[in-house]
Image (tube, rainbow, N blue to C red):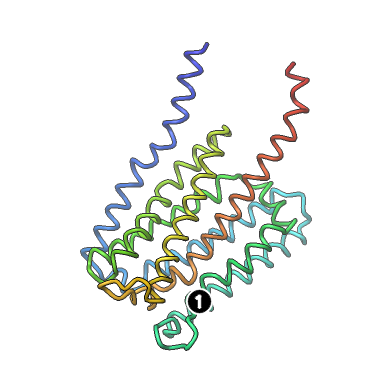
Amino acid sequence: MTAVAIHVDDAGTRQPWRALLWLAPLVAFWIALNYWQPGIQASGMPTVTSRVFINALLALGLWLGLERTDLTPGQRRNVWLAVMIPFTLWLGLMWGAAINGVFRPGVSPIPLLPLAILLPVVVGAPILLRSRRIGQVLDAMPATWLVALQVYRVLGSTFLIGWARGVMPAVFSLPAGTGDVLTGLLALPTAIYLASGSEDGRRAAIAWNIFGLLDFSIAVGIAFLIALQVIVPSIPNTANSVYPAVLTPAFAVPSSILLHVLSLRQLRRRARATDAEAPLQAPALA
């Protein structure tokens, strides 16, 4: 009995990491392809495709989550519109500003890129953490969705490619690119582990979220120190201020931070619900 249980637990632990066997080679191939063909990133097509696809996936996931709740059709529609309209307008605004060179150094007396990163988080995080409707959606949808979605973080490999080609400083590109790629690579294994329903799976998801947030803290902190000239790299860090690369800090970074915030709120609510149910189930088990 014990041997069987140990075997099942070991198999359940190993299975999530099998996702890396096919995901890691794909990411390595993508990095190599973009290194040898820099015109791919310069065209902006990967950025356009990924941003549109992720926006559509978020819209679909939110709607499917709403359908799992007890809200009326009208309430579901209102919540969906209340989230997706500001999110899509924000994407359009950042996109237009990036194309028109608004984030280039010297264009504005006020550095706009830090505002683009911090303002959505400062405004959006309290709303997402306190909204009762959002809480209902988080309770209804699988916790794996918000984790697995961030597999797109492997696209942060553009920082590593920029360093390898000598157009981005190593002091920024190496920690930012490595952190993004690791977060993206670990997203699917973590989601699969979380789907097992074990306490270890939940802890792994919390650790993954914290790692993803630390990655942003380090990358954004270094970028700010470079902008303030506290750190003066040998290669100017100007590539992240022009289109299409600027869409990563201006849009992808704050949206990913908010996804981490939502995931942590969802995991916390699930833990509380489990703790509340435990005393009720204990007499029955006894």
In the picture, measured across the screen, residue 73 lies left or right of residue 210, that is right
Q: Is 185 situated left or right of 273 in this image?
A: left
Number of numbered discs on residues: 1
Taking 4 as reference, is 145 above or below it?
A: below
Q: Which residue is mark 1?
A: 94
State the image coordinates of residue 131 (x, y, percent, origin top left).
Answer: 72, 59
Q: Is residue 171 above or below residue 264?
A: below
Residue 120: x %, y % from top left: 58, 69
Q: Determine the residue located farthest toward the top in the rendered image.
A: 1
Q: Residues within 10 Å of mark 1 (few under 14, many from 20)?
A: many
Residue at (55% x, 49% y) in the render: 145
**Left or right of 72 in this view: 56:** left
Q: Quadrant of residue 261?
A: bottom right
Considering only vertical position in the picture, is 3 above or below 137?
above
Amino acid type of the residue tagged 1 in the rendering: Met
- Residue at disc 1, secondary structure: helix
Give the residue at x 41% y 74%.
Answer: 246
- Which of the 4 quarters of the picture holds residue 269? top right
The one of 225 and 76 positioned closer to us in this rendering: 225
Residue pictured at 64% horizontal, 69% vertical:
123
| Percent position of residue 140, x then y | 68, 47
Of all residues, the one furthest to the left in this rendering is: 36
Give the x, y percent position of residue 16. Answer: 44, 36
User: Which residue does the image show at 63% across and 53% down from the upper left?
Assistant: 64
Looking at this view, name the residue that lies furthest to the front: 230
